[in-house]
């Protein structure tokens, strides 16, 4: 089973074209008898409070299983723990269950989020977010990411970030770590390099 988590702001779904593209790409890759789905026609946020931010969670396989709307409360992230994956992780598609990543998340200890490092020593993603590293005002995202999130895709398309191979030994060369996903645009969640736990 797969999932899309969509930001609803001022009554409108954000980055909906990116979500729609990912959903249909995922279904076409996994199901033979699949008809394209238009999320714009199945998401109906008209009943939501325009002054609140919501998370719309769409669960699906070859068809939509459920659509749920919940007020979104942004996490307070002040520290990141580096965790190492002993085996390669295949997370090309946004699945509901991801046990390999859950095992790494359990190693978080007192930190607020994790930075996942693959067996080659390259930085990939956080648990809930894609990673963007800032250096001298320039923004880079690891090309060894696990999931190409919709916000990451949007920022790459707009030319606001650049892909780059980033080894964990190079992390100290950067100033800040930005965490982005569909619910968290660039600049909303950021952590100083000094607040990374090794």
Image: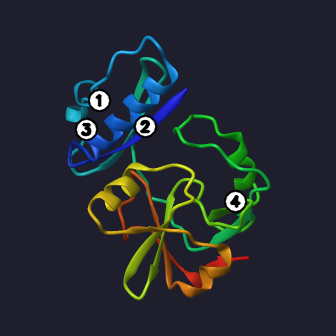
- Quadrant (top left, top right, bottom left, bottom right) of the N terminus: top right
Image depth: mark 4 or mark 1 in front: 4
Q: Residues within 10 Å of mark 3 (few under 14, many from 20)?
A: some
Label 4 vs 1, first from the N-terminus: 1
Residue at 70%, 54% in the rendered image = 105
Q: Which numbered tag is attached to residue 4?
A: 2
Answer with left or right where residue 76 lies relative to residue 185: right
Circle 1 is placed at which residue position?
39
Look at the numbered discs 1 and 2 and tell me whether their residues touch, using CB distance below 8 Å.
yes
Looking at the rendered structure, which numbered label has been put on residue 106? none
| Mark sitting earlier along the chain (2/4) | 2
- What is the total number of numbered labels drawn onto the structure image? 4
Q: Which residue is mark 3?
A: 48
Cα gap from disc 3 to disc 1, whole angstroms: 17 Å
Label 3 element class: loop
Q: CA distance from mark 1 to mark 2?
A: 10 Å
């Amino acid at each position: 089973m797969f999932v899309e988590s969509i930001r609803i702001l001022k009554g409108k779904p954000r980055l909906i074209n990116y979500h729609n593209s990912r959903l249909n790409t995922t279904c076409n890759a996994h199901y033979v008898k699949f008809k394209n789905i238009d999320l714009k026609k199945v998401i109906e946020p008209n009943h939501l409070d325009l002054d609140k931010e919501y998370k719309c969670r769409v669960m699906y396989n070859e068809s939509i299983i459920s659509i749920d709307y919940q007020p979104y409360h942004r996490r307070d992230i002040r520290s990141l723990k580096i965790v190492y994956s002993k085996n390669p992780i295949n997370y090309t598609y946004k699945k509901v269950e991801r046990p390999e990543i859950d095992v790494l998340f359990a190693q978080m200890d007192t930190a607020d989020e994790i930075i996942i490092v693959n067996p080659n020593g390259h930085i990939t993603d956080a648990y809930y977010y894609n990673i963007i590293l800032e250096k001298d005002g320039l923004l880079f995202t690891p090309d060894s990411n696990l999931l190409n999130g919709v916000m990451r895709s949007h920022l790459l398309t707009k030319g606001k970030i650049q892909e780059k191979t980033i080894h964990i030994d190079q992390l100290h060369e950067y100033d800040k770590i930005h965490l982005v996903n569909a619910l968290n645009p660039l600049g909303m969640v950021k952590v100083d390099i000094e607040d990374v736990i090794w």
